[in-house]
Image: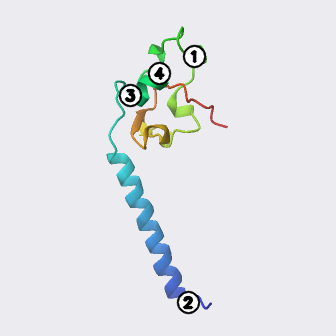
Amino acid sequence: MHCSRRRFIIAAASLASTSIFVDEAQADAPMVSESDPTAQSLGYKADATQVDKAKFAKYQAGQDCANCQLYQGKTGDTSGPCPIFGGKRVSAKGWCSAYVKKA
């Protein structure tokens, strides 16, 4: 298969524009609500300091969505998408019982 420079440039431009559209779609995703059934079952709180520590003993101070492996927001963002909630955005300062410490 012969790969010309023109084909490479077209493919690279297509890939780059696709990632821009994905980033824009994630930014437009709705915020998950604490009243959402999935959020309730996982104990999601937009403010991790409000977690019911008696009900969710796994929670430890300092855990929040921003330092969770599942969080797809960028460092410094106030919210970002989370696959646990179908790509809806979660607060960077939030927490749920699906929390996994970022490696």
- Label 4, label 3: how many angstroms apart (C-alpha)? 10 Å
- The picture places residue 24, in percent across and down from the top left corner, at 36, 53
Dot placed on the residue nearer the N-terminal end, 3 or 2: 2
* Callout 2–callout 4 Cβ contact below 8 Å: no
* Callout 1–callout 4 Cβ contact below 8 Å: no
Dot placed on the residue nearer the N-terminal end, 1 or 4: 4
- Label 2, label 4: how many angstroms apart (C-alpha)? 53 Å
- Give the colouring mode of the picture: rainbow
Where does label 3 land, which residue? 37
Out of 36 and 6, give the one closest to the viewer. 36
Dot 1 surroundings within 10 Å: few (below 14), some, or many (20 or more)?
few
Q: Which amino acid does the dot numbered 1 rest on?
A: Ala
Dot placed on the residue nearer the N-terminal end, 2 or 1: 2
- The picture places residue 18, in percent across and down from the top left corner, at 42, 65
Dot placed on the residue nearer the N-terminal end, 2 or 4: 2
Q: Which amino acid does the dot numbered 3 rest on?
A: Pro
**Closer mark to the observer between disc 1 and disc 3:** 3
* Callout 3–callout 2 Cβ contact below 8 Å: no
Q: Which mark is residue 43?
A: 4
Q: Residue 42: tell me if it is visible.
A: yes
Label 4 secondary element:
loop
Where does label 2 land, which residue? 4
Q: Which mark is residue 61?
A: 1
Dot placed on the residue nearer the N-terminal end, 4 or 3: 3
